Image: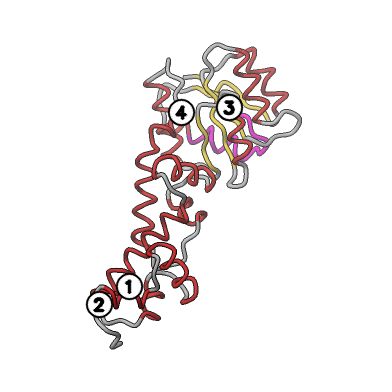
């Protein structure tokens, strides 16, 4: 497999080259460039199997470069490298023909998994992330279930599963049928219900145990159940506060 690397950071180019050549067999780095303009000139001549490109570069960026590579034909697969704040660029690159993206700093196992998939299926142009969606979503759900009592943001959970926050948000909407915030709220309120009916903890203690302050807890609980925590406990014969 012949690979071309485009990134305006010399250390990134050198690091990727060294990583790939050291640990992958049957792979050749055929060239590299610090700008999109230099890259497309060489890619046109070399016609590599894979191009790994940063999404932001001088003159021609990764979005434009991906479109130009797609126009070349020849089955070149383009992988985008992006930062956490580049998802709009990534989305457009995917529309322009990129097969997948990796977040910086690049995790070796994710890069190698993607490259091995390309080696194993040279004729396919499917997105690697589309294959990983179920496990990524499941991992995010498990993280929320394990850490619901802590501070939870979309960014924190996305980082735990190595996804861009905007991408994880889309996955929740598509595969769970609800937003990240709504799902997190449901997990917390479900646990709160168990504590209200099965323990003697005060409501003020329970709200902290499920990751809320009192005002936010009352508002979220009523949003989900239609009643206040105290009304819920009383109407279902929960154990009265003793702690």
Q: Which residue is mark 4?
A: 127
Estimate how packed mark 2 is, as few (under 14), some (14 to 19) or many (20 or more) residues with alpha carbons within 10 Å: some
**In-front residue for pair 184/160:** 184
Are the residues flagged by discs 4 and 1 in contact, CB closer than 8 Å?
Answer: no
Q: Please give the name of the residue rendered at 40% of the width and 74% of the height, measured from the top-left corner.
A: 207
In the drawing, what numbered circle is on residue 232? Answer: 1
Q: Which residues are magenta?
A: 6-19
Q: Earlier in the sequence, mark 1 or mark 2?
A: 1
Q: Please give the name of the residue rendered at 38% of the width and 32% of the height, measured from the top-left corner.
A: 131
Q: CA distance from mark 2 to mark 3?
A: 54 Å
Q: Please give the name of the residue rendered at 58% of the width and 34% of the height, measured from the top-left corner.
A: 91
Where disc 4 sits, the SS reads loop
Where disc 1 sits, the SS reads helix
Are the residues flagged by discs 1 and 3 in contact, CB closer than 8 Å?
Answer: no
Q: Is residue 162 shown left or right of residue 236?
A: right
Q: Please give the name of the residue rendered at 59% of the width and 28% of the height, measured from the top-left corner.
A: 5
Q: CA distance from mark 1 to mark 3?
A: 49 Å
The answer to which image quadrant residue 176 occupies is top left
Q: Which residue is mark 3?
A: 95
Q: CA distance from mark 4 to mark 2?
A: 50 Å
Q: Is residue 47 above or below residue 113?
A: above
| Foreground tag (3 vs 4) | 3
Magenta-colored stretch includes residue 87: no
Are the residues flagged by discs 1 and 2 in contact, CB closer than 8 Å?
Answer: yes
Q: CA distance from mark 1 to mark 2?
A: 8 Å
């Amino acid at each position: 497999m012949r690979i071309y690397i485009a990134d305006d950071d010399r250390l990134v180019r050198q690091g990727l080259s060294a990583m790939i050549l050291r640990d992958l067999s049957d792979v050749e780095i055929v060239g590299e460039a610090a700008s999109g303009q230099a890259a497309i000139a060489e890619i046109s001549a070399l016609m590599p199997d894979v191009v790994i490109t940063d999404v932001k570069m001088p003159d021609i960026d990764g979005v434009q470069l991906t479109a130009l590579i797609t126009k070349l034909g020849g089955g070149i697969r383009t992988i985008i490298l992006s930062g956490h704040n580049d998802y709009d660029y990534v989305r457009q690159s995917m529309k322009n023909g990129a097969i997948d993206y990796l977040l910086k700093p690049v995790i070796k196992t994710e890069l190698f998994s993607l490259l091995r998939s390309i080696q194993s299926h040279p004729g396919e142009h499917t997105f690697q992330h589309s294959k990983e969606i179920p496990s990524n979503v499941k991992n995010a759900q498990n993280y929320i279930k394990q850490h619901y009592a802590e501070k939870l943001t979309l960014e924190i959970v996305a980082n735990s599963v190595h996804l861009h926050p905007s991408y994880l948000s889309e996955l929740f909407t598509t595969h769970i049928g609800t937003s990240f915030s709504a799902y997190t709220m449901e997990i917390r309120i479900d646990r709160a219900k168990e504590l209200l009916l099965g323990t003697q903890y005060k409501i003020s203690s329970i709200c902290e145990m499920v990751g809320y302050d009192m005002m936010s807890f009352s508002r979220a609980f009523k949003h989900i159940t239609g009643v206040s925590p105290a009304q819920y406990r009383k109407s279902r014969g929960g154990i009265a506060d003793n702690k």
